[in-house]
Amino acid sequence: MQKNILIVGAGFSGVVIARKLAECGHKIRIIDRRSHIAGNCYDARDQETNVMVHTYGPHIFHTDNKEVWDFVNQYSVMMPYINRVKATYKNRVFSLPINLHTINQFFNKTCSPDEAKALIASKGDSTIETPLTFEQQALKFVGKELYEAFFKGYTLKQWGMQPSELPASILKRLPVRFNYDDNYFNHKYQGMPQQGYTSMIENMVEHPNIQVELNVDFSDDDRGGYDHIFYSGPLDAFYHNKFGRLGYRTLDFDRFKYDGDYQGCAVMNYCDQDVPYTRITEHKYFSPWESHEKSVCYKEFSRNCEEGDIPYYPIRQMGEMTLLHKYLDLAEKEESITFIGRLGTYRYLDMDVTIAEALNTAKIYLQSLSNQDNKMPVFTVNVR
Ligand SMILES: Cc1cc2nc3c(=O)[nH]c(=O)nc-3n(C[C@H](O)[C@H](O)[C@H](O)COP(=O)(O)OP(=O)(O)OC[C@H]3O[C@@H](n4cnc5c(N)ncnc54)[C@H](O)[C@@H]3O)c2cc1C
């Protein structure tokens, strides 16, 4: 039987579920409070330069998940794109992630892979047995010089916290490559949608069973009017922040134009503590198959999210987790609603994980319809 479904949020989470359920004959209404679809992945061409600009910060698609890769390829031509990040520190430019080139540049050496391994091992702080903090973990792995150059200032600026206040778990593996591989991601499939993410998501909602309404905020009156609601807005906002606001970092972008080529690469990190921004992104480099004389760049600043700011990165430290559990206790009592996506589940999610979770959520919902014993859960992932 056809179900009447409301989806709150036209980002990847909402739209992927909408598409899968629409294809099974259900009637979908998507609302978004913004004036555009695509959520934080929204991109649009700059009118003057025609450069495709990633409005809410640069987005690079990378995944090992073939199902997700095949899915996005149905809605866009994916163009080859490899992210190669550079870093400026003390007036010198280095290659990231730390690789053999970085090590040789930084220590002014010509090490082979084995020599570099020995060098880094000799730099690591062997007195730290069980690292408890991010700082200790980095010092143990790479030693003081590389830690101070590439982790300390950048992390402080990005998270607004000393690395000694962050958990060691952030740095799970040795963040160094002993070869010249400077591909920022390790994933098998990497690329960029030829016409941008907005166009890809427009193609996903192009279905007779999907109706999209923009500039529409979710209201409590919407509850009860549908067979099911999928909500990708912030979990705390759903409950009118009754216990307080969950902590996020937000970003400010100083957008500027340049007549020519500003920095010669897509992403330049700034690791010095006294440089207030974390990175500069030059957006024409995210579409290397296009050519543009003029350029559009973003200088990126990170700070704590205040009321009215766009929440970007969930902080998930101890205080936030205590608050989160209060909201989860409330949410888990709900009926006919599922919280989805990065805001609904208060987790940082890359696009591929977002899409994989959305595909899975749609499957679980369809199973719940075909088998009365399978109640649709409020969360389809572990959020605690
Ligand atoms: C700076 C930055 C860079 C990133 N770079 C990458 C990258 O390079 N690669 C990668 O894979 N991932 C990247 N990501 C992650 C990517 O942005 C997310 O995976 C993706 O946006 C999650 O989609 P979503 O639908 O869950 O959330 P969103 O895209 O945030 O969509 C949620 C939507 O819900 C709407 N909404 C919220 N509340 C309401 C309400 N009450 N009523 C109506 N509408 C509402 C919002 O307006 C929004 O449009 C990056 C994220 C950030 C912050």
Image (cartoon, rainbow, N blue to C red):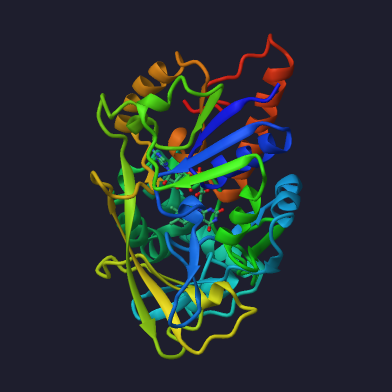
Q: Position of residue 145 (x, y in %)?
A: 39, 65
Image: 347 above or below 73: above
The residue nearer to you, when weighing 130 against 147, is: 147
Residue found at x 60% / y 19%: 376
The residue nearer to you, when weighing 9 against 129, is: 9
Judge whether residue 74 can be spotted in this image: yes
Judge whether residue 321 can be spotted in this image: no
Whether residue 332 sits left or right of residue 381 in the image: it is: left
Image: 246 above or below 10: above
Q: Position of residue 149 (x, y in %)?
A: 38, 66
Q: Quadrant of the N terminus?
A: top right
Image: 17 above or below 185: above
The number of numbered badges drawn on the structure is: 0
Q: Position of residue 232 (x, y in %)?
A: 47, 37
Quarter residue 100 falls in: bottom right
Whether residue 118 sits left or right of residue 283 in the image: it is: right
Whether residue 306 sits left or right of residue 217 in the image: it is: left
Image: 337 above or below 295: above
The residue nearer to you, when weighing 384 against 169, is: 384
Spot the residue most to the front.
Answer: 208
Whether residue 267 sits left or right of residue 274 in the image: it is: right
